[in-house]
Image (spheres, rainbow, N blue to C red):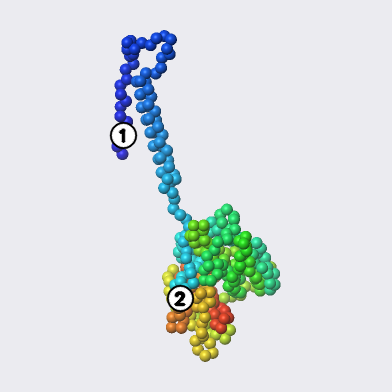
Amino acid sequence: MTDQHPAAAPVVSDQVSTALAVPDEVPAGPDRSTLRLALVVGGLVLAVLLGFGLGRMNTDGAATGGPSLAAEHSDPPGIGPHSHGTATGTDQGTPTEPGGLAVSSAGFTLAPLGTEFAAGRPGQLRFQVRDVQRRPVTRFAIVHDKPMHLIVVRRDLTGYQHLHPTMATDGTWSVPLTLAQPGVWRAYADFTVVADNGAQTAMTLGTDLVVPGGYQPRPLPDPATSTTVDGFTVAYQGTPQAGATVPLTFRVDGAGGAAPLERYLGAYGHLVALREGDLGYLHVHPEPELVDGQVKFWLTTPGPGRYRLYLDYQVGADVHTAEFTLIVP
């Protein structure tokens, strides 16, 4: 950078002409040369101070502002296949990291108002989603017909439930909940927050629930691509691979052939995948229409391991759940 210097101040004489002598009774004031010199020096000082201040503003970012941290997310019913729980942008990490592993993320915290339940007894789960100032959040987007999807499962991946709590005006969510067996259960809150400026942030937060008693975990069933539930035979085709997005197609057959599937929560099926061990969470939505009478998903498994798949589907206004064990090498 080229150095810049201010223009030289005019030369001022320090000799006063005797022709301009002032009578003794009149007090002498500053001459014009002195005033000009003072103005020049004052201007230079002011320029330096202004330049320093502007430089500080640009360095601190006050003049230009900073980037927004709000991640937009729009998920109306009928949208194409996609996943919830997988972290994106400001959500929960890398794009291949499952959700539900943390109770806090992106400035939001899942705060249960009680975590202990008696085995087999009807109870009530109540919780809030709080922001970074610990204030309850009250603005949520409607995603697949509901503002809140709650998945509950025991840590051995049994007892799966897909619930939809309701919210009071103070931001407290509540839902009836019965946990059949003793043990530690995992609750996943899957939701989309709406900011004051309309930006939306989708995330999944998780917390543990406790049922006192003797915990006897059940081993996962062997891997299989078909199962029978409530008189329906459900089978899938596809080979998931770690870190890759692959298609999975599910066919539901009744006694007379292909079952007449109905839309449930805006889609022909909902697929939840939980990873054994850390219970990483994926919630996958299918193609908006059936493909050759089958429900088609695109599944990205974040890494190798054993997974439990839960397919929710609806026939005759009743919702059913088919479960599968999947091994990803």
Q: Position of residue 224 (x, y in %)?
A: 51, 80
Q: Quadrant of residue 37?
A: top left
- Residue 94 in percent (x, y) is at 46, 62
Residue that carries the numbered disc 2 in the rendered image: 288
The structure residue drawn at horizontal position 44% and vertical position 68%, both measured from the top left corner, is: 243
State the SS at label 1: loop
Q: CA distance from mark 2 to mark 1?
A: 66 Å
Q: Residue at x 66, y 72 (%)?
A: 178
**Quarter-wise, where is residue 176 in the image?**
bottom right
Q: Along the horizontal axis of the image, is 224 left or right of 174?
A: left
In the image, residue 189 sits, relative to residue 132, either above or below, namely below
**Front residue of this view, candidates 18 and 228:** 18
Q: Quadrant of the N terminus?
A: top left
Q: Establish if 145 lies above or below 195.
A: below
Rendering coords of residue 104 (x, y %): 56, 59
**Dot 1, how many residues are within 10 Å of its Cα: few (below 14), some (14-19), or many (20+)?**
few
The residue beneath circle 1 is 4
The numbered mark, 2 or 1, whose residue comes first in the sequence reads 1
Q: Amino acid at mark 1?
A: Gln
Label 2 CA crowd tier, 10 Å (few <14, some 14–19, many 20+): some
